[in-house]
Amino acid sequence: MVPLKVLTLVVAGPTQPSVLVLQPVEDSPAGKARIVPIWVGPTEAAQIGIALEHVKFGRPMTHDLFLDALTNLDARVDSVTIYHTKGQMFFSHLVLNQGGRLITLDARPSDAIALALRQDAPLYIEEEVLSAASFPFLFRGERQTEEELAEFKTFLDHLSPEDFGELS
């Protein structure tokens, strides 16, 4: 399994899918990386964005309610693993830890990642899924300028699920 981090979330309009961009946490040659784009719906993007920004509301949102229930059952999110891809669809496991006992649940990556981000739980991807679903991306220098970030977002805006063909 390869550790992942969220590189960015590109939020589109209410009727278009957004793109969650994941990146392996790995030693890669300077300025080079692989990215894994996952298309998510507007509601899912909003939940991930809320988790990334650590936004708190007066009343619990669905993901917060789920985490409150876990806490009251003496459990917490242990990790998320993206273990399979079929076409543009990704499959993940949400791993819970309850008193040292690991419980694995099938979950959509968007939901699992939204929960993991809220509890600072690690994200992983199986190496074969990373190989099949990732794209190379070059970073120029140690820091990115606003222009380079805009160029990256333009690149993502012009990608469509059809660009990926059939991934098995």
Image (cartoon, grey):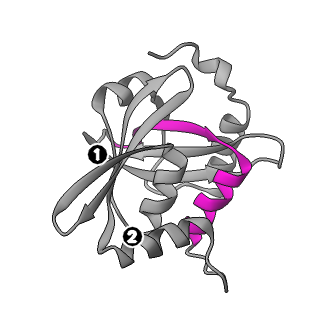
Quadrant for the N terminus, please: top left
Numbered circle sitting on residue 66: none
> Residue 130: x and y, percent?
37, 30
Tell me the CA gap for discs 2 and 1.
Answer: 31 Å
Query: Front-most of 22 and 39?
Result: 39
Left or right of residue 75: residue 9: right
Vertical position of residue 119 compared to residue 132: above or below: below
Compared across the picture, whether 154 is left or right of 14 comes to left
- The kind of secondary structure element at disc 2 is helix
Residue pictured at 51% horizontal, 43% vertical: 108
In the picture, measured across the screen, residue 85 lies left or right of residue 42, that is left
The amino acid marked with disc number 2 is Leu
User: What residue is rendered at 36% in x and 25% in y?
Assistant: 131
- Residue 160: x and y, percent? 69, 27
Residue that label 1 marks: 26
Residue 34, percent from left and from top: 42, 35
Q: Is residue 116 above or below residue 165?
A: below
Q: Residue at x 47, y 38 (%)?
A: 35
Q: Is residue 81 magenta?
A: no
Report the span colored magenta: 30-53
Residue occupying image coordinates x 47% and y 61%: 115
Q: Secondary structure at mark 1?
A: loop
Which residue is the site of mark 2?
A: 70
Q: Amino acid at mark 1?
A: Glu
Of badges 2 and 1, the one in the foreground is: 2
Comparing 116 with 135, the one in front is: 116
